[in-house]
Image (spheres, rainbow, N blue to C red):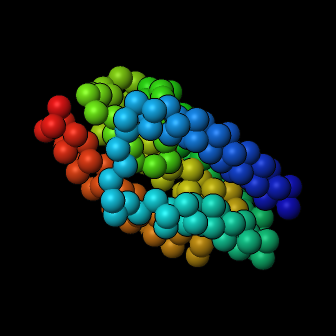
Amino acid sequence: MIRLLLLVVAVFGFMLVEARRAASNERAQRALGGIEPKHDVYPAMQVAYPGIFLAMIGEGLFRPEPPIALLTIGVVVFAAGKLLKWWAITALGQFWTFRVIVVPGSAPVAAGPYRFLRHPNYVGVFGELAGAGLIAAAPVAGVLGTLMFTGLMAARVRVETRALNAILRRG
């Protein structure tokens, strides 16, 4: 039960910090003329992201404690995902938000993890979800939730790519 309480604190504590940062960055981007494309999957992501974690934690309430090896792997995967995500957030600076907003005249970020990965933030989110599923010992919600959110992230990448390409063409 302690592991689930710690997971709640870690997941939703970071989520609150990230929400504040995203809102601040969104205001800054809009002040610079940032444009948000239509047909984003953000409304679904906004519900699914916390919902999947809640489903995993809920399932974990009815499951036995995971073996220490699985718990350790879960903690390492979650922490690695979170570190990669925050490296991406730091590299993007004021351009990181929950929404897709492209500022005219801006260039794609090629620093930090973006030197190695095209979408490190989403790789980090995948790690968060997979790690949380292992920590919670939630094989059903963990696998299904991670797969579902991966589908949303793939759709999101298409939205981001179209928006960025459109703004770069206007350049």
Residue at the far right: name it: 2
Residue drawn 19% across the image and 45% down it: 166
Residue 46 rendering spot, x and y as whole percentages: 55, 60
Residue drawn 41% across the image and 63% down it: 41
> Would residue 62 be found to the left or right of residue 155 on screen?
right
Q: Nearer the viewer, residue 48 or 94?
A: 94
User: In this orientation, does residue 104 appear?
Assistant: yes
> Would residue 148 be found to the left or right of residue 57 on screen?
left
Residue at the far left: name it: 169
Residue 118 rendering spot, x and y as whole percentages: 30, 39
* Picture quadrant where residue 63 is located: bottom right
Residue drawn 63% across the image and 56% down it: 132
Instruction: Give the quadrant of the C terminus.
Output: top left
Vertical relation: 161 (above or below) 135: above
User: In this orientation, does residue 88 appear?
Assistant: no
Vertical relation: 27 (above or below) 5: above
Residue 165 rendering spot, x and y as whole percentages: 19, 43
* Picture quadrant where residue 54 is located: bottom right
> Would residue 106 be found to the left or right of residue 89 on screen?
left
> Would residue 158 be found to the left or right of residue 3 on screen?
left
* Picture quadrant where residue 18 is located: top right
Residue 96 rendering spot, x and y as whole percentages: 47, 36
Instruction: Give the quadrant of the N terminus.
Output: bottom right
